[in-house]
Image (cartoon, rainbow, N blue to C red):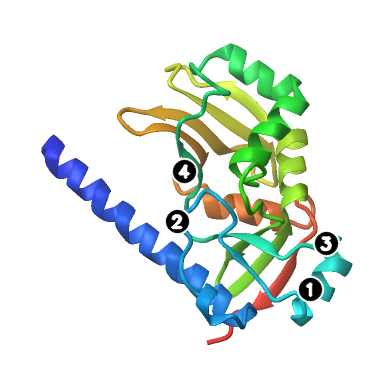
Amino acid sequence: MSNQKRIDSCREIGEKVRRIGHAREVQFKTQFNSITELNHPSYKAEADASFDSDHPIQRILLEKLDISGTSCSIKSGRNLQFLLGRLPEIGKISKHCAERLNNDHEFCRSLFNQYLGKSISDLPAELLVYYYNDRWIFFSMNDVISYIVEKCQWRLTPSGRSLKGDFRDSSRKGMRQYLTIEVRKGKGTFLGANGNRGRPFIELLMDPGFGIRHHIEEVTH
């Protein structure tokens, strides 16, 4: 495949993923938010959606996840992208970056609060919600970020081009890579779970032995 064909193919796949993602946002808002003018996709670096404060889900999430806010980051698919662009906090990928992420919990928490939790935006995300087999899986965003800060072990790859985040799990080796930070030529820095590791990361968060508290709601059609 020529370089141009590869670029065109990646662009087409990216556009398809964006369409699916925005469709999930609208689907979520239709189910949990009665204000119809809000049922449009968000293109800002902030929470994707909110649910009605008087919706029954509010009481459930307060009891199960200790969450009183209503703003959500909606995710789906095999990969999770928290950021693709400027990541000045990391700068050049290096062993020093991995060591800082592992040892400086305040720095690591600040990084994921900003780029996963959208903490410095006009609408920070109180919850991470993942579309999973016709179900919505709700997590406290603070729980997810705390899990990453406390459980993830970062390492520099042999090529020196990326940082990989490993977590203990029930796999044969007892630990597996889920998260990635890497520089992509012409696009900036990627932060998230690529290589089809997004869905397994959500499954890790749901795992009874290794995961965190969560709530499941069936998708209505």
Query: Regarding mark 2 in the picture, which secondary structure is present there?
Result: loop
Q: Which residue is mark 4?
A: 194
Up the image or down, 111 lies above or below 216; here it is above
In 3D space, how far apart are the residues under numbered discs 2 and 4 (Cα atoms)? 21 Å
Residue 134 appears in the figure:
no
Residue 151 figure quarter: top right
Amino acid bearing label 2: Tyr
Q: Amino acid at mark 1?
A: Gln
Quarter containing the N terminus:
top left
The amino acid sitting under disc 3 is Leu
Q: Which mark is residue 65?
A: 3
Of residue 46 and residue 159, the one placed in the foreground of this image is 46
Query: Residue 189's x, y, as percent?
Result: 44, 31
Determine which of the numbered discs, if any, sits on residue 43 in the image: 2
Q: Residue at point 61% right, 12% down?
A: 96
| Residue pictured at 13% horizontal, 39% vertical | 4
